[in-house]
Image (spheres, rainbow, N blue to C red):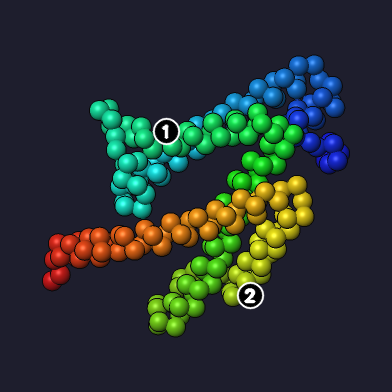
Amino acid sequence: MIAPWKSAGVDKSPFVKVMEILNIAGASGIVNFIVLTAALSAMNSQLYASTRMMFTLSRSKYAPAFFGKVNKKKVPVRALAISTLGIFVAAAVTAMVPESSYAVMMGVSMFGAIFTWLMVFVSHLFFRRKWEKSGGRKLPVRMIGFPYLTILGALLLLSLIISTWFTNFKILLQFGIPWLVILSIAYFIWKKKNAVYHVSNDESIFSEVKID
C-alpha cells in the first residue's frame, strides 16, 4: 500500500523499496540482508527436498536407478548433483538474460504450482464421483458446494494459466506445455517397462500378509 504498484519492478525487493521511501537510515540494507538470508534458507530447504524426492523416486523405480545410489557416508550424492543442477541453470539464465530472468524463473516455477492445484481440483472431482458411484462409505468431511465450487476452481486456474500468454509470464506456457509432453512420453515408456515389476512386487507383498 506504500509503494505504487507501477514502480514495483524486479530490480529491488518491494520491502527494500518501502524502506527507501520511508528514508530510514540503514533500514533498506538490513531488510535486504534479511530477504537474501530468507531466500538462501528457502533454496537450501528446497534443495534438500528435491534431493530426497529424486532419491525416493529412484528407489521406487519411478526414476533412473542411477540416482538411487549413495556414497560411503550414505549420502545420495547423485540425486543431490542433479538437484543442484537447477541452481546453476538459474544462475546461467540470470547471467544471459538479466532483463527477463525474473519473469522466466517465476514463470517456470509458477507452472508447477498452478498446474498442481489444477490437478487437485480435477482429481477431487473425479474421485468423489467414482467414490459415490462405487458405494463407498459416507465421507465425514465434505466440501461445501461440491461439485460446483470444484469445477469453478478448476476453471479459474485454467483461465489463469491461459491468461499468462498475454503477459510477461508467457514462459509459463512456453515451458509448461513442452514439459508436460515430455513427462507424458516418459510416463508411458516407464509404465510399459515397469508394469511387470510392480505387479510382481504387489503380489509378493500380499503373499506375505497373513489373513485370519
Give the residue displayed 36% in from the left and 35% down from the top: 78
The label shown at residue 81 is 1
Residue flagged by tag 2: what amino acid is it? Tyr
| Count of numbered circles in the view | 2
Give the residue displayed 54% in from the left and 33% down from the top: 87
Give the residue displayed 67% in from the left and 48% down from the top: 171
Asked if labels 1 and 2 touch by Cβ distance under 8 angstroms, the answer is no
Q: Nearer the viewer, residue 78 or 154?
A: 78
Res. 42 image quadrant: top right
- The residue tagged with tag 1: helix, strand or loop? helix
Residue 157 vs 67, above or below: the answer is: below
In this view, the residue farthest toward the top is 25
Residue 197 vs 46, above or below: the answer is: below
Mark 1 Cα within 10 Å, few/some/many (few <14, many 20+)? few
Location of residue 66 in the rendering, given as x and y in whole percent from the top left corner: 32, 41
Marks 2/1: CA distance? 44 Å
Q: Nearer the viewer, residue 144 or 52?
A: 52
Location of residue 199 in the rendering, given as x and y in whole percent from the top left corner: 25, 65
Q: Is residue 30 visible?
A: yes
Location of residue 14 in the rendering, given as x and y in whole percent from the top left corner: 76, 34
- Please give left or right for residue 5 compared with residue 202 in the image: right
Q: Which residue is mark 2?
A: 148
Mark 2 Cα within 10 Å, few/some/many (few <14, many 20+)? few
- Please give left or right for residue 73 compared with residue 191 in the image: left
Give the residue displayed 31% in from the left and 51% down from the top: 60
- Check the picture and name the quadrant holding the N terminus: top right
Q: Earlier in the sequence, mark 2 or mark 1?
A: 1
State which mark lies toward you, 2 or 1: 1
